[in-house]
Amino acid sequence: MEKLVLDDEELSILARYSVRVDQTIVVEPLKRLTEDTVNRILEKNSTVKKVGIQASDLSSPLTFEGPYMFKRVNGILIFNRTAS
């Protein structure tokens, strides 16, 4: 993937991603994100209403309606879907 969209904020990020059956989104950055970047994302977007993924192998962006809680575990970004 090349871009991650959290609500209306677009982040350029080279990463692998997967979407689990329960709609959990896992993003594994190919280049380590700095602590400042992660903290900025967490402060602004600890809960997001919509997650979008743009990748060159997709004909159109993927969009997942939330709300999603966001956390970082060992450098991997995890978006868990929460109850509305």
Image (cartoon, rainbow, N blue to C red):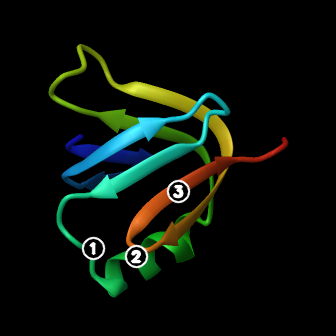
Q: Secondary structure at mark 2?
A: helix
Q: Secondary structure at mark 1?
A: loop
Q: Where residue 57 sits: x, y (%)?
A: 18, 22
Q: Secondary structure at mark 3?
A: strand
| Residue type beneath disc 1 | Leu
Q: Label 3: which residue?
A: 78
Q: Where residue 72 sits: x, y (%)?
A: 50, 70
Query: The C terminus appears in which quarter of the rendering?
Result: top right
Number of residues whose C-alpha sits closer than 10 Å to that of mark 3, classed few (under 14), some (14–19) or many (20 or more): some
Upstream in sequence: badge 2 or badge 1: 1
Nearest the eye: 83 or 6: 83
- Which residue is at the far bottom? 36
Q: Quadrant of residue 30?
A: bottom left
How far apart marks 1 and 3 lie (CA) works out to 14 Å
Q: Where residue 3 sits: x, y (%)?
A: 26, 45
Nearest the eye: 20 or 51: 20
Number of residues whose C-alpha sits closer than 10 Å to that of mark 2, classed few (under 14), some (14–19) or many (20 or more): some
Q: Is residue 36 above or below residue 32?
A: below
Q: Is residue 66 above or below residue 71?
A: above
Q: Which mark is residue 57?
A: none
| Residue type beneath disc 3 | Ile
Camera-nearest label, 3 or 2: 3
Nearest the eye: 82 or 45: 82
Number of residues whose C-alpha sits closer than 10 Å to that of mark 1, classed few (under 14), some (14–19) or many (20 or more): few
| Residue type beneath disc 2 | Val
Pointers 2 and 1 in contact (C-beta within 8 Å): yes
Report the residue at 36% width, 36% height from top: 53
Q: Label 1: which residue?
A: 33
Q: Is residue 83 above or below residue 29?
A: above
Q: Which mark is residue 38?
A: 2
Query: The N terminus appears in which quarter of the rendering?
Result: top left
